[in-house]
Image (spheres, rainbow, N blue to C red):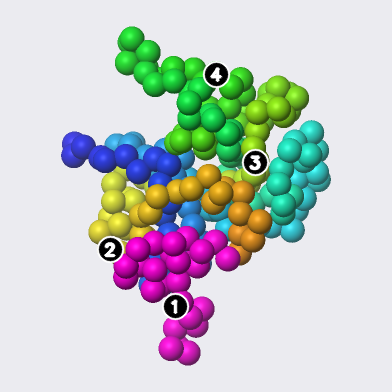
């Protein structure tokens, strides 16, 4: 099997030509990517459902907007918590002597990339309250079978760019697609001005 270069922690930004309505103008944070496939959450799909309505104990730790986000079309009844822990990258450790990932020094939080990680929503919120910088709750996720994401990338469906901790907690998530493209260098930044309706161009 071909070795897959992991894109874990990077952003997938939908190209204007991506026709799938689930991912039109989507910005996806990849939480896992290897030879077995990929998994991520869409960062710019807020729902009208308040976090307090479904996960009340965590509501006071979420930023604005304090709503549940639709993380993708898969398992919409499952919740994922993605949080930024300031300094979390420094406390997550590397690999242990056996070659496995070391446990995070922050209980209830597992580092994904830099200061971004997954929260154990079954843990008591008080365990993490002092550590969390920002928290977002996602219903569902986006998933790709082995080789599927690589095919979509080859077709030009996605742009792959670096993530920033602020992407997870953007106070204006609806504008994240343009914002992420605008901060890129060169030709990619020009796509930020692409009209919502290409027929108007």
Q: Earlier in the sequence, mark 2 or mark 3?
A: 3
Magenta portion: prevailing SS class: helix
Does residue 161 sit above or below 177 in this rendering?
above
Instruction: Describe the element under mark 3 as helix, strand or loop.
Output: strand
The residue at which mark 4 appears reads as: 105
Return the x and y of residue 10 as percentages of the image width and height. Answer: 40, 47
Residue 184 is one of the magenta-drawn residues: yes
Residue 14 in view, yes or no: no
The residue at which mark 2 appears reads as: 155
Name the residue: 35% across, 63% down: 185
Segment colored magenta: 175-201
Return the x and y of residue 70 as percentages of the image width and height. Answer: 61, 53
Instruction: Pick whichever, 177 or 156, lies toward us.
Output: 177
Name the residue: 71% across, 47% down: 63
Cα separation, mark 2 vs mark 3, equals 34 Å
Crowding at mark 4 (Cα within 10 Å: few <14, some 14-19, many 20+): some
The residue at which mark 1 appears reads as: 194
Instruction: Describe the element under mark 1 as helix, strand or loop.
Output: loop
Marks 4, 2: nearer the viewer? 4
Name the residue: 58% across, 34% down: 86
Crowding at mark 3 (Cα within 10 Å: few <14, some 14-19, many 20+): many
Instruction: Describe the element under mark 4 as helix, strand or loop.
Output: loop
Marks 2 & 3, CB-CB < 8 Å contact = no
């Amino acid at each position: 099997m071909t070795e897959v270069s992991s894109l874990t922690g990077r952003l997938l930004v939908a190209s204007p030509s991506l026709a799938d309505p689930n991912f039109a103008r989507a910005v996806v944070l990849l939480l896992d990517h290897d030879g077995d496939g990929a998994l991520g959450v869409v960062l710019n799909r807020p729902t009208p459902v308040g976090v307090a309505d479904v996960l009340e104990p965590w509501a006071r730790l979420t930023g604005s907007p304090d709503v549940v986000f639709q993380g993708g079309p898969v398992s919409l009844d499952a919740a994922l918590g993605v949080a930024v822990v300031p300094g979390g990258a420094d406390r997550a450790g590397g690999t242990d002597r056996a070659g496995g990932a070391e446990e995070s020094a922050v209980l209830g939080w597992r580092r994904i990339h830099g200061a971004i990680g997954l929260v154990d929503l079954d843990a008591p919120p008080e365990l993490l309250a002092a550590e969390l910088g920002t928290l977002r709750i996602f219903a569902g996720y986006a998933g790709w079978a082995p080789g599927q994401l690589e095919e979509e990338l080859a077709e030009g469906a996605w742009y792959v760019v670096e993530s920033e901790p602020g992407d997870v907690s953007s106070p204006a998530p609806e504008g994240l697609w343009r914002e992420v493209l605008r901060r890129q260098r060169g030709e990619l930044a020009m796509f930020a001005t692409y009209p919502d309706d290409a027929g108007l161009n």
